[in-house]
Amino acid sequence: MATGRGWILRQHSIGVSRPLSDAIPSPGVDSRSPFLVAPPGATAGVGGGSRGVLFERPKPRSPGAFLESHSFSAMSEYPAAMQLKKTHSRRMCTRSTSIKSNSAIDFDRMPSEILLKILSYLNAESLLCTGCVNKSFYHLSNDNTIWFKIYSKSFLPKRKKWRTESAQESAVSLNLPELQDRESGYWKKEYIMKKIAAGKADLIQLLKPINTRTGLPVKTKEAIKISGLKWMVILKDRNGKQHVLEQTDISYNETSVTVYWNYFKWPCLETLSVLQIFGVTPVLLSDSEVHPKNRPMQRSLISEYDLANLTENAKMIGCDALVELYSFDQGLLVGLWKKSEIAFVMACLHYHQLIERSTLGSATVRYAAAPDKAILDDIDPEYGMHGYQLHIDLHSRGNTYMCGTFRSLFCKKDYIRNGYLRFTVINYKKTAQHLPLVGNIGLSWMTGVFEGNVQNCFIMDVTLLDDSQKPYWCFSAPVNMVLSPKPSGLYQYLGPSYYLNYMDLTGKVHMELVWMEETNEYCIINLVLYLSTEKVNSWFGTNY
């Protein structure tokens, strides 16, 4: 018995280790014979004698299993038990791999009826994302039956809302002329267009209440959050490559919003040519709290800047031990490391027509507001020179240094010089009008690693209303105070004096300040606005 078992193990190891060619029977041997050669000491016979032992040939296995057991001739160097164990484990791995591969779903072979049934459970945003997978899914996601059902739920007439759900489902039938007579994707377009129009109408209704002090919508901050409005920066290099950067932080103020882009790594400044700021909003406004990560968005170009020779084209307004601040027009501020590489980007956006500028433009064209028609007045000889109202706010990242409203500003014809109308807001001779600045003046900045504060810099928001309380001149921009070479002419203030200047196409702002050592604070002793006569004449239809 022991001899027979040892012979069986040896024969099995020889059969496993021999090459595949040895397994093919020779022409003289009948491969269909169910018997093998008998072991030593055994007599093979037919009919089964007392010493005759018959050995049945193993049943044929599949080709994969056969190749698997005969593919490694080096297995003969190992003991038979180890070979059996390795062969068994390899068979189990092959079996588990085949099970995993069979569990994958092949959508290309799935019938379109089943795919349409699956897509019918998705909402509008998920359907739009599904259409971006490939051409097949694009056509499936345009199915009129699915979109007509979504359209009916959102814009069903009020007289039909009392009907039961089963009646609504029965209305969505392939026999409806709305589905048969329309091209593919018709109800998708109708739903998107109507949804966008409804979202814009809601925002317009939300922005109707006006603040009497600022002349701006009261709920601009709420409108920004409800619309899902965000801002992004796109940097273009000289080779045409784009770097898309989403906003990292935002600060809401009374009449403006400050958006920050703080990243640890930026593209090399020498390779960049253009910087663009876009307003980004979702195509569809949804009440759902969970939104797809890559849901469809639309861009609206707000401003564009040339980064070539940045240090020469922009104005440096301040610096500290780490960064230098460069100011562009329309409220853009770029912070550069001492090695002339970008540290951060900051944009100051005034609330006046901010929603329109961020949503109604396109990816290449900015939003253009309709020109205001001049209302002529032949009775008032000084029409357009009085009745102005100014609201000014000085702040930096949540810290307000001064906020005030000044009414009944006027200009005499004798004050029209060099193409500007002069409006005195704070007179340096009237001490009662002087205003102090609260807190430590400085512009806060932050990157992915460092943060700091540049002294004598802040953000100035100016909102000037005309005599009909309409916004006439609005801007938000970073500014700096410059040490004046001449001391103050007022005996009340013995500290150093500073001045601040801002200028754009509409007008100029001139401010004078004095450092009060007794109270350790700055005080505004003079504030003057200069309005361009060209802008005044086009606004009021005058000829100054």
Image: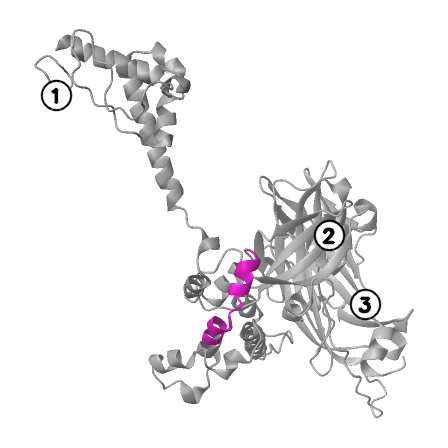
Give the main secondary structure of the magenta stretch.
helix
Left/right of residue 344 with respect to residue 104 in the rendered view: right
- Please tell me whether residue 97 is drawn above or below residue 139 in the rendered image: above
Query: Which amino acid is tagged 1?
Result: Gly
Closer to the camera, 348 or 195? 195
Left/right of residue 188 with respect to residue 461 in the rendered view: left
Instruction: Report which residue position mark 3 lands on.
Output: 507
Dot 2: element: strand
**Residue 137 within the magenta-colored segment of the rendering:** yes
Mark nearest the camera among 3 and 2 is 2
Closer to the camera, 7 or 355? 7
Instruction: Report which residue position mark 2 lands on.
Output: 275
Q: Are marks 1 and 3 in contact (CB under 8 Å)?
A: no
Closer to the camera, 241 or 434? 241
Mark earlier in primary sequence (1, 3): 1
Instruction: Report which residue position mark 1 lands on.
Output: 47
Q: What residue range appears in magenta? A: 134-150
Closer to the camera, 30 or 57? 30
Q: Residue at (70%, 49%) from the top-left corner?
A: 235
- Please tell me whether residue 64 is drawn above or below residue 191 in the rendered image: above
Q: Residue at (17%, 19%) from the top-left corner?
A: 54
